[in-house]
Image: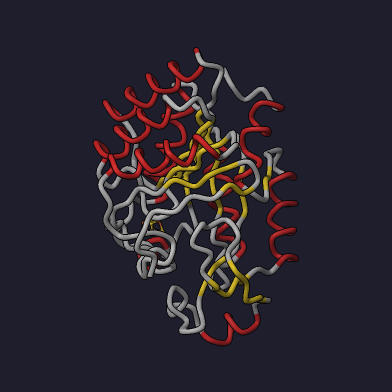
Amino acid sequence: MAKTIQFKVEKDRVLVPVGEACSFGCKYCYTRGGEVGPPKVKREEILHELKKFSQEAKFGLIQFGYDGDPFVRPERGIWMLQELAKLGKHITFSTKALIDGSLLEQLSTIQQEMASQKTVMVALISVSCWESAHRIEPHTPTPSERMMTVSNLKKVGIPTLIALRPLLPNIADEEYEHVIDEGIRASTDGFILGPLYGDVKRRFVRFIPTDMLEKTPSVIESVSWSAHEPTWIRYENTSRSQRMAQMIRAKRSQVLLSSADVIEFVQRRKVLV
Ligand code: SF4
């Protein structure tokens, strides 16, 4: 288990933890064992350690929220984003929360302040299923609520993509097509595809029937995006990912294969308002 905060530059980005357990309880969640960061850390300590790290490391992008959801407790997420925005880097945050009202207004203010410093904030809204969400993500805001988040963020000028990940072997393509259609209707700027992670004890993937899991191509690897570098099994059916990507492009939306490419994407596409 990871006991200390660690940072690492990979592809010009640094992942920054929320530092608090997430109560959304998605069945595929890989954060519960603490391998990607300590389960409870003071927000001030995370910022302090990040600032120290930034003095020596060179990077352009902060990715916030890989060990938990920043808006399970919105006041913590907003406080951390306000502080991160002062560091002069681009920022992405990942969430499954319903964002509206005062939370939306505060994010809009952060976005405007960052724009005046010529930095960009991009939202990544995670959706892994639609009709099956009540089974797989039972305590998480519904996919419909997450689409309201997409639409709300877009209305205030925050570039927003849907993280269609993990792509689950036990969810049919038709269900993903539903997510894609709803995402386009909500005005998403595009989709990011991504793999499923498990470990040798099959934690995070127990809810998937064994035969389906065994048919999914997999590789055991050290997870490069995490400073803690856990060794996990990466399940990824690349021909299925290509099929999804083709479906998204056929519907005239955009596909990315890594969230590391998001800032370059929004700047190139002039997604910014
Ligand atoms: S929202 Fe993310 S961190 Fe929270 S339970 Fe789901 S996968 Fe885990």
Give the left or right position of residue 130, taking residue 1 as reference: right
Q: Quadrant of residue 120?
A: top right
Foreground of the two, 134 or 194: 194
Q: Residue furthest front?
A: 56
Foreground of the two, 20 or 178: 20
Classify 196 as above or below 245: below
Tell me the quarter of the image containing the N terminus: bottom left
Q: Quadrant of residue 196?
A: bottom right
Foreground of the two, 214 or 132: 214
Give how far across and how far down residue 206 sits, in percent.
44, 80
Q: Quadrant of ligand 1?
A: bottom left
Give how far across and how far down residue 62 sits, in percent.
51, 38
Give the left or right position of residue 145, taking residue 165 as reference: left
Give how far across and how far down residue 140 sits, in percent.
33, 55
Q: Residue furthest bottom?
A: 211
Give the left or right position of residue 52, taking residue 239 as reference: left
* Total numbered badges shown on the rendered structure: 0
Q: Quadrant of residue 223?
A: bottom right
Foreground of the two, 212 or 63: 63
Give how far across and how far down residue 212 sits, in percent.
58, 81
Which residue sits at x=66%, y=26%?
267
Classify 77 as above or below 39: above
